[in-house]
Image: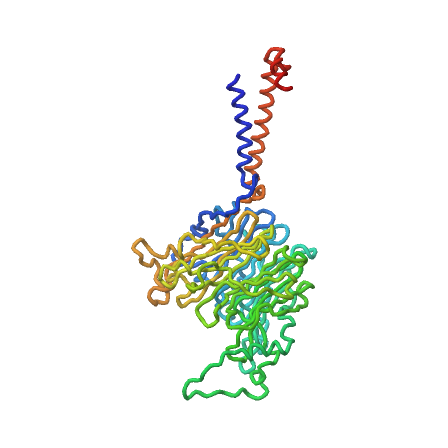
Amino acid sequence: MKTSFRRLSALAALGMAALVAMPGAGSAASTPQLTKPVDATKADLNPQRTYSAPYLAVNPDNPDIIVGGFIEFRARRCGLIRSTDGGSSWKILDATPEIKSQPYCLANNSNIFHAPVAWGRDNALYLTTHAWDETTRTQTSVILAKSTDMGDSWTTIFARDARTTSGDNQENDRPVTGMVVDSKSGPQDIVYILYRRAFVNKVAPNAAPQEPVLAISRDGGKTFEEPVSAIGTVYQDNALRQLPLTSRTTVTLAPGATTTVPPSGSLASTPDNIKNYGASSNGQGLTLDSKGNVYVAYMSEVANVASPPRAIMASKSTDHGKTWTSTMAVPFSYEQAQNVREAWTPGGGPNGTLHLVWEWRHPGDLAQYADVGYVRSTDGGATWSKPRSLADDDPKRLSPKYLPMLSVAPNGRIDAAWWDTRDDPGIQRAQDVYYSYSEDDGQTWSKNIRVTDQTIDRRFGVWGNNFDQNSPPSLASTNQYAFLGWDDTRFSTGDDGQVLVASPVGANGFGGGVQDIFLSAVQFEKLGGGSSTTAKIVLAGVVGLLAVGLILLGVGMVGKQGRGSPAASSPSKTQAGAKK
């Protein structure tokens, strides 16, 4: 009898112990842990494969479902990888999102994601990319693909068909730099696609500046309105337009060189003309807040002017993209290099907090160097903090950092990732993914975490190597995890160290080899009770085990009392005395 009772007690104790051991059931620990990297493209054995880092998005209704839009560079085609088990395993989907008449989605621009993805309501999945064929290379269009079965099939339309433009108004609409979906403001998803518009037939001395432009659909991706510029109002300030002109670096002419006077009446002859001011193609940020306000950040550009410094401008729309106002977030300086990314968190101020990261060339006289610059605004973008670095290595080492990326978890944690060269073993073409996070709306940031399990050798693949095709590191956030991805060249060489795939361009083997997609996660020990399917199943089992144990324990107690002597049901004298 004692043995049976002990077994029942042990069963109940086991349930309690398992519940306490569940992540998130007890108090939270403070140190996040890295998961083992997963090769998401291991099923592809094509010896010419060169995948980009994927643009990741987590299903807001089921964080076990994660998708990543990618481009396979040598094939010039975009596609999707998908995980339905929280990133443990991945599948390359067969369906492709292109329009058959314009099948290529490769943009010659570097430093971008070629296939941004976003979730809408009712599990709708959106993917946007570039579109062209051999005859429309300078008329690249923008397309939107929508899937209602998590990427198994797609319906694709033009968000902007550049083939309808011609003459001075001929557009080349690339690169696509971002997409967000507002699934709360209207009866249907509002889809915002940000891209750079260039009028390629307008040349110096009357070249048109590039612009950050939004294609907007207010009916869940069925139709798109005429594109709208997000430049905003900042350039209406004449004093501001003088700043990049008066802070230009003076260049000494070579012996015998002469200057050319711009033609009278041209835009080049009046550099401060507002028609000269636009946005650089080198990175633009796009985000939403909880009220449906839309934000765009961009690097400035001055057309028809030689080598002006750049500023970072921040635009805002409170009417769902119809009109825009803007301010200068980071002043004109040669320290502002490229690749702006923007995100929003709900805390920090009455309007939440806006966050910007970019390649910060600090100090500005080092052409090949960049740091991770960061600023924040707690008043809706009206004013901004002073720039600071998110990197925590010794700045005297001047280890370059590139292409920062931002993402926000539902609980407000903001995640940042970037390419980092601090662990370069000396080959001058090596990178790792580094990560940092903030839980107080950017006031403080964690110690940098190295995510990659081995340094990426960029002597292989298409990062540079006469191709110059690259993407930021991937980043998507849940309360439990920060998911990170990267393009990896580790399978480019055999055991003898020789490249397995020869370079299509020669040049010492640079450009040969392969690129695969690897993904890992920073797992926070504070899992919040387990919102993932796996956690819920385990928790349900634990609760069930605990309930069964307690019931059986109760039955055992009753049974033990019932089988004892009558005195056992009431305290003995000794027991009664002990209670007094």
Q: Position of residue 133 (x, y in %)?
A: 50, 67
Q: Position of residue 160 (x, y in %)?
A: 59, 67
Residue situated in front as seen by the camera: 169 or 553? 553
Q: Position of residue 325 (x, y in %)?
A: 66, 69
- Total marks in image: 0
The C terminus is located in which quarter? top right
User: Is residue 221 in view?
Assistant: no
Q: Quadrant of residue 179?
A: bottom right
Horizontal placement of 216 versus 452: left or right? right
Classify 440 as above or below 509.
above
User: Is residue 285 in view?
Assistant: yes
Q: For the point 64% across and 76% down, which residue is it?
A: 237
Classify 118 as above or below 274.
above
Residue situated in front as seen by the camera: 457 or 387? 387
Q: Position of residue 94 (x, y in %)?
A: 49, 53
| Colour style of the rendered protein structure | rainbow
Q: Quadrant of residue 379?
A: bottom right
Q: Quadrant of residue 125?
A: bottom right
